[in-house]
Image (tube, rainbow, N blue to C red):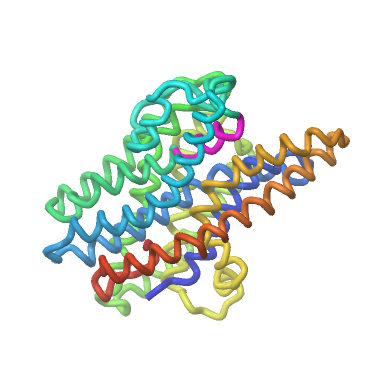
């Protein structure tokens, strides 16, 4: 069963990230300064969907083969295509830099070790539109590392070890963020797996709660009401904190428990949408709105291509000698159009075809949700 509301939630996540990267020039768009949190929403969704699949596949004899094969066929094609384009172009113009600039993205270890700010360190070394294209790929490293370690945990860990692992991720990630030293421009330490693993863990916890609830929904009626209240309280508190402190990760409070509270709020929203899926209430049906779901469908490629598309349109519009405001507006608008064009072209020309082939060649269990295909 596909949970349509989660497609809409995925769309909001990618739109928030796009706004953060491309639309901070407008006075009335300053709220988009918190758009970087869209990545955490992606993490929570991934934790939920992947853990749901792993739990349902737990007894399957081809557990690892099916899971990793399906993950590879979903993640690798668009990612490797963009890497091939970036590397090919960089080599063609003689600005490819060192091999390690590329191997960290090819083998997904970007987020394992805190590094210098790649957005500034690569200036003058790699082509200007390649830098932001590579820059957004740190989150793929976080997710791939989680997939790698989490599948064995779900398969083999005892119940106590399983919950202990989740608990450690909840506790350690904000501690790592609190003690991470500040860097001059970007807070590069929080772009590591260690500092963002709690978002994935919150999503995984929701998957466990949903699984337990499905065994006896009637017994969960009181708990469901408590979760609804908790969602409202946590969401309101999170919004107030971000309004008060601002959206930038400029304080230890924001980077530590402020981000943890945000991830918890996202997890509670996911739980509410799954539980109320199909409801006719406007605040649920909104997430099933077809244009929103369509954006959610192409969100992966849209995430990968939006920043380099924007940088390319910035360069092009810069030659038109417009006023500062019109320059920013035009570059953002054209970048957005180009991003959607590329994302939908990739979806219909490559992604959807690979996914259909994947379902034929590496079928999952019939009862496993296809949300994370």
Query: What residue range appears in magenta?
Result: 128-137
82 or 269: nearer the viewer: 82
Q: Residue at x 24, y 49 (%)?
A: 150
Q: Residue at x 41, y 45 (%)?
A: 80
Residue 210 drawn at (x, y percent): 32, 67
Based on the picture, tell me whether residue 135 belongs to the magenta stretch: yes
Q: Residue furthest front?
A: 92
Residue 343 image-quadrant placement:
bottom right
Residue 101 image-quadrant placement:
top left
Residue 129 drawn at (x, y percent): 60, 34
Q: Quadrant of the N terminus?
A: bottom left
105 or 23: nearer the viewer: 105
Residue 9 visible in the displayed image? no
Residue 230 lies, with reference to residue 326, above or below; the image says below
Based on the picture, tell me whether residue 318 belongs to the magenta stretch: no
Residue 168 visible in the displayed image? yes
From the viewer's perspective, tell me whether residue 358 is left or right of residue 61: right
Q: Residue at x 37, y 29 (%)?
A: 176
Q: Residue at x 13, y 65 (%)?
A: 59
């Amino acid at each position: 069963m596909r949970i349509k509301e989660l497609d809409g939630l995925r769309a909001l996540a990618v739109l928030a990230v796009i706004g953060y990267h491309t639309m901070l020039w407008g006075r009335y768009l300053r709220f988009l300064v918190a758009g970087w949190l869209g990545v955490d929403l992606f993490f929570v969704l991934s934790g939920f969907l992947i853990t749901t699949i792993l739990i349902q596949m737990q007894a399957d004899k081809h557990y690892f083969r099916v899971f990793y094969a399906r993950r590879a066929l979903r993640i690798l094609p668009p990612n490797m295509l963009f890497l091939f384009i970036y590397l090919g172009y960089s080599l063609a113009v003689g600005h490819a830099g060192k091999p390690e600039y590329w191997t960290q993205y090819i083998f997904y270890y970007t987020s394992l070790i805190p590094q210098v700010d790649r957005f500034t360190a690569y200036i003058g070394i790699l082509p200007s539109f390649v830098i932001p294209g590579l820059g957004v790929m740190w989150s793929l490293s976080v997710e791939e590392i989680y997939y790698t370690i989490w599948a064995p945990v779900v398969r083999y860990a005892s119940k106590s070890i399983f919950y202990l692992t989740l608990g450690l991720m909840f506790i350690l990630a904000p501690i790592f963020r609190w003690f991470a030293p500040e860097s001059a421009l970007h807070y590069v330490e929080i772009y590591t797996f260690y500092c963002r693993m709690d978002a994935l863990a919150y999503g995984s916890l929701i998957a466990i709660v949903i699984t337990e609830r499905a065994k006896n929904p009637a017994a969960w009626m009181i708990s469901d009401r408590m979760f609804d209240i908790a969602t409202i309280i946590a969401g309101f508190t999170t919004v107030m904190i971000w309004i008060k402190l601002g959206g930038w990760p400029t304080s230890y409070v924001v980077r530590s428990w402020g981000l943890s509270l945000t991830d918890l709020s996202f997890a509670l929203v996911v739980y509410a949408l799954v539980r109320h899926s199909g409801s006719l209430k406007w605040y649920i049906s909104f997430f099933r709105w077809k244009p929103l779901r369509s954006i959610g469908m192409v969100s992966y490629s849209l995430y990968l291509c939006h920043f380099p598309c924007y940088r390319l349109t910035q360069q092009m519009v810069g030659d038109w000698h417009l006023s500062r405001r019109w320059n920013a507006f035009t570059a953002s608008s054209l970048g957005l159009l180009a991003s959607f064009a590329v994302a939908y072209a990739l979806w219909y020309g490559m992604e959807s075809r690979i996914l259909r082939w994947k379902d034929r060649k590496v079928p999952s269990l019939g009862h496993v949700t296809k949300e994370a295909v």
